[in-house]
């Protein structure tokens, strides 16, 4: 199995004290370092791209082609089961 090595560069940011305190608290809840926690948040924010299945579903909804086949009784049963 090949392991991909990602180059990392050290950088500095100025953050509000209350924000940094909150980031530390949230990272600790997940047993992660602040660096790892913040990097993950940033990656999620920057690389939020839907997969092929999600893209297809989005196109289906936008086109309205599946609305005629939507069984509202079945949908209501699903909602009630929650």
Image (spheres, grey):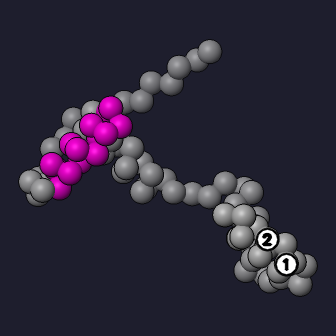
Q: How many angstroms separate mark 1 from mark 2 (CA)?
A: 6 Å
Residue 46 location, quadrant: bottom left
Quadrant where the N terminus sits is top right
Which secondary structure class fits the magenta region best? helix
Foreground residue among 49 and 28 = 28
Q: Is residue 45 above or below residue 12?
A: below
Residue 48 is one of the magenta-drawn residues = no
Q: Which residue is mark 1?
A: 73
Nearer to the camera, 7 or 29 = 29
Q: Can you tell which mark lies on residue 63?
A: none
How far across and down, in percent of the image, does residue 29 sit?
Answer: 31, 39
Q: Which residue is mark 2?
A: 77
Residues marked 1 and 2 touching at CB (< 8 Å): yes
Q: Which region of the structure is painted magenta?
A: 19-32
Element at badge 2?
Answer: helix
Give the farthest residue toward the left.
Answer: 17
What is the residue that sits farthest to the right in this orientation?
69
Residue at image location 27% in from the left, 33% down from the top: 33
Report whether residue 28 is seen. yes
Q: Residues within 10 Å of mark 2 (few under 14, many from 20)?
A: few
In the picture, residue 2 is in which quadrant? top right
Q: Is residue 28 magenta?
A: yes
State the image coordinates of residue 48 (x, y, percent, origin top left): 51, 57
> As drawn, which residue projects farthest toward the top?
1
Q: How many marks?
A: 2
Q: Residue 44 vs residue 31: left or right?
A: right
- Locate the C terminus and report the quarter of the image it occupies: bottom right
Image check: 48 left or right of 9? right
In this view, 41 is above or below 9 = below
Q: In this rendering, does residue 9 appear at all?
A: no
Work out whether residue 72 or residue 8 is closer to the camera in this orientation and state it.
Answer: 72
In the visual, does 49 lie left or right of 60? left
């Amino acid at each position: 199995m090949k392991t991909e090595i990602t180059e990392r560069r050290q950088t500095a940011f100025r953050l509000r004290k209350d924000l940094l305190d909150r980031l530390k608290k949230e990272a600790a809840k997940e047993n992660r370092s602040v660096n790892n926690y913040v990097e993950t948040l940033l990656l999620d924010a920057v690389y939020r791209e839907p997969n092929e299945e999600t893209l297809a579903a989005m196109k289906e909804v936008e086109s309205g082609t599946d609305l005629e086949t939507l069984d509202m009784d079945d949908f209501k049963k699903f909602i009630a089961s929650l």
